[in-house]
Amino acid sequence: MIILHNPEDKASRDFVEQHGSGHTVLSYPDCVAQYPYISAFPSVVVDVPATLAVDEAGQPTSEVIPAHYELVRMPETWSDVDAYLTEVTARPKP
């Protein structure tokens, strides 16, 4: 995983100190060039595979959403990231 980090932010420093080992840590401002939609620190980059869109009733459609990344903004613990990963992997696959 990639953690986007702002060394000036205490929550970001604490998160990286606790969870940075074994992950890639990209610091501000360098991370903005690669991830321009970042709006909070820390954030964790989650690679999302191609999925199917869902309709208003929550049913999968035939529309394929291409693979992309999403950001978990300001997780307090790694379990917040794990919960997001669980949600991502439950999305319908093409």
Image (cartoon, rainbow, N blue to C red):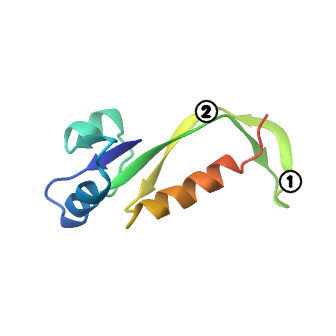
Q: Is residue 39 above or below residue 22?
A: below
Gap between marks 2 and 1 measured at Cα = 19 Å
69 sits left or right of 64 in the view: left
Quadrant housing residue 66: top right
- Residue visible at 85% across and 43% down? 61
For label 1, the SS is: loop
- The residue indicated by pointer 2 is 67
Q: Position of residue 74 (x, y in %)?
A: 37, 62
Q: Nearer the viewer, residue 44 or 60?
A: 44
- The residue indicated by pointer 1 is 59
> Circle 1: is it few (<14), some (14-19), or many (20+) Cα within 10 Å?
few
Considering every residue shown, the one lying at the far front of the view is 22
Q: Is residue 68 above or below residue 39?
A: above
Q: Position of residue 22 (x, y in %)?
A: 33, 42
Q: Is residue 1 above or below residue 56?
A: above
21 sits left or right of 45 in the view: left
